[in-house]
Amino acid sequence: MKVFVTGGAGFIGSQYVRAMLAGEYAGYEDAEVTVFDLLTYAGTTANLPLGHERLTFVQGDIRDEAALEEALPGHDVVVHFAAESHVDRSVTGAVPFASTNVVGTQQLLDSCARYDVATVLCVSTDEVYGSIETGSWDEHEPLQPNSPYAASKAGSDLLALACRRTHGLDIRLTRCSNNYGPYQNAEKLIPLFITNLLRGRPVPLYGDGRNVREWLHVADHCTALQLVLTDGEPGEVYNIGSGVEVTNVSIARRLVELCGADPSLIQRVADRKGHDLRYSLDFSKITKLGFTPAIEFTAGLESTVEWYRAHPERWPAPAG
């Protein structure tokens, strides 16, 4: 079995790769893994066991047809993580998001069809659904993205499903809730707050802090992805959530406690443009494949803080 992982040097992709190489996924204990990653600011080979005998690393761009032509043939499975993913960056500069997430996905899909890849698993986000006041989204909800990032991922999703219908490719699509855990780039909320608080620096809380996110540990997410890859159905969409919904202000206060920081470091700032109030997934469909989140949020958050505490080299350079 040969597995081609785009964006495999990033936060979620590298967790998936490390777990697969560690033999955690039944039936894939001997899989050969190729990581294909552009190594933008959000990805680093430090996330990967580069010396592993079953790992090949290729620095490449999913928009580059020639690079894919060289690296992709001969692989059985593609797991597609590669994306521009930071909402704030998309608000101030959306073109890279459309280019990578839409054009890049289409180029990858074209290459997969050309080189007879057996299965393509596309990893997406709950943000494509928009914002929900009550209840939870199932996989049949209309796509109503509110940020350039979410819109680009919705476009990516639609292209993937169209490829299934047009070319008959075995496409499987997942949409996950907010992930947390070790190795995440410190521009995202939880690692940003942790690394700032450990330094005694303020953390920016948008608006009143009542925005609700559903938090899923990255290891649980990757376990679910593997279930979809092995037991899911071609052409199907699977939500991956945890049921753990927490306001941003509650996250901030808990991280202050875990980091031993001063509560005054939580500083309210103007709300982000188009800031979605609440995300919530109905993930009952994937539970039928046997998925149950294993990592309890309180314990997962504590271990994440301890990981960043033990790895100051992963903290961002101080501003200025």
Image (spheres, rainbow, N blue to C red):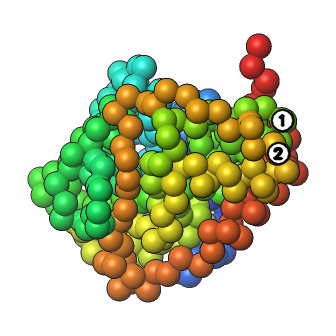
Query: Which residue sits at x=43%, y=67%?
Result: 241
Left or right of 139: which side holds 59? Answer: right
> From the viewer's perspective, is residue 174 above or below residue 22?
above
Judge whether 61 appears above or below 3 on screen.
above
Instruction: Name the foreground residue: 316 vs 113.
Output: 316
Q: Amino acid at mark 1?
A: Gly
Name the quarter where the C terminus is drawn. top right
Mark 1 and mark 2 in contact (Cβ < 8 Å)? yes
Nearer the observer, 46 or 53: 46
Q: Residues within 10 Å of mark 1 (few under 14, many from 20)?
A: some
Image spot of residue 83 (x, y percent): 44, 40
Q: Is residue 227 left or right of residue 301?
A: left
Between discs 2 and 1, the one toward the N terminus: 1
Q: Which mark is residue 50?
A: none
**Outermost residue toward the left?**
166
In the current view of this chain or complex, which residue is farthest to the top?
A: 320
Residue at screen point 75% across, 63% down: 302
Regarding mark 1 in the picture, which secondary structure is present there?
A: loop
Q: Which mark is residue 200?
A: 1
Label 2 belongs to which residue?
261
